[in-house]
Each structure stands twice: as structure tokens, then as C-alpha cells.
Image (cartoon, rainbow, N blue to C red):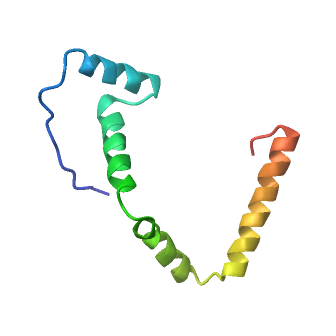
Amino acid sequence: MSRETETITITGLQPGTTAALEELARQEGKDTDDLLRRWLQVELLSRKPFREILAPVRASFKASGMTADELDALVKEEREVIWEEKQNGTNG
């Protein structure tokens, strides 16, 4: 599946900025482009109203046909599974 992408160029960074970004990316197991892309996306998303962020989730839930009670039961069941895994020292 191909994705359209956009490119930006940043100029005027203080000396050492690129090296610092490369080190942070290395520590997170990413390349610098991935690190910066994630930071930008998080910053942009954080400025949206919460209802707008959740709109696709709400639409998907509605399309699923699941009721609120069924969702509650599913969440409860999964929380119990996670709790049991933590108690037994297993990770799935």
C-alpha cells in the first residue's frame, strides 16, 4: 500500500542539535526522521479537541454493531486477563 508523504526542511538549528537528535533517536531505537515525525504528529494531535480525536473510534464502534454493554463486558474480561497475567508473572 503506498502512502503519500510530505517533506519539510528545517534550517537554523543550533550547533549540536542534529547530534542530540540522532542520540535520542538511537536511544529509542528509531532513526532521526521517525523520531521527528512522531514528535510532530503528537504535537499536532495534542492541539485537536478530544471529540475530534475520538471521532474515528466512535464511527468504528458504531459500525461494529456492538452495544455499550457488550463493550463494557469485553473491557472487563480483558482487564481480568491482564490482572491474572500480572499475578502469574506472565506476559501473554
Identity of the residue furthest to the right in this view: 88
Name the residue rendered at 75%, 41% in the picture: 91
Quarter of the image where one finds residue 21: top left
Instruction: Check the image and report above or below for 39 versus 57.
Output: above
Position in image of residue 14 (x %, y %): 19, 20
Which percent across, then down, holds residue 42? 38, 48
* Corner quadrant of residue 52: bottom left
* Residue 35 placement (x, y as % from top left): 36, 35
Q: Is residue 15 left or right of residue 57?
A: left
For the point 56% across and 79% down, the residue is 64
Front one among 36 and 49:
49
Looking at the picture, does residue 47 appear above or below residue 12?
Answer: below
Q: Position of residue 24 (x, y in %)?
A: 39, 24
- How many marks the image carries: the answer is 0
Image height check: is 52 above or below 83? Answer: below
Q: Residue at x 34, y 37 (%)?
A: 34
Q: Is residue 32 left or right of residue 89?
A: left
Residue 82 placement, left or right of 33: right
The residue that appears at 15% across and 42% down in the rendered structure is 8
- Name the quadrant of the N terminus: bottom left
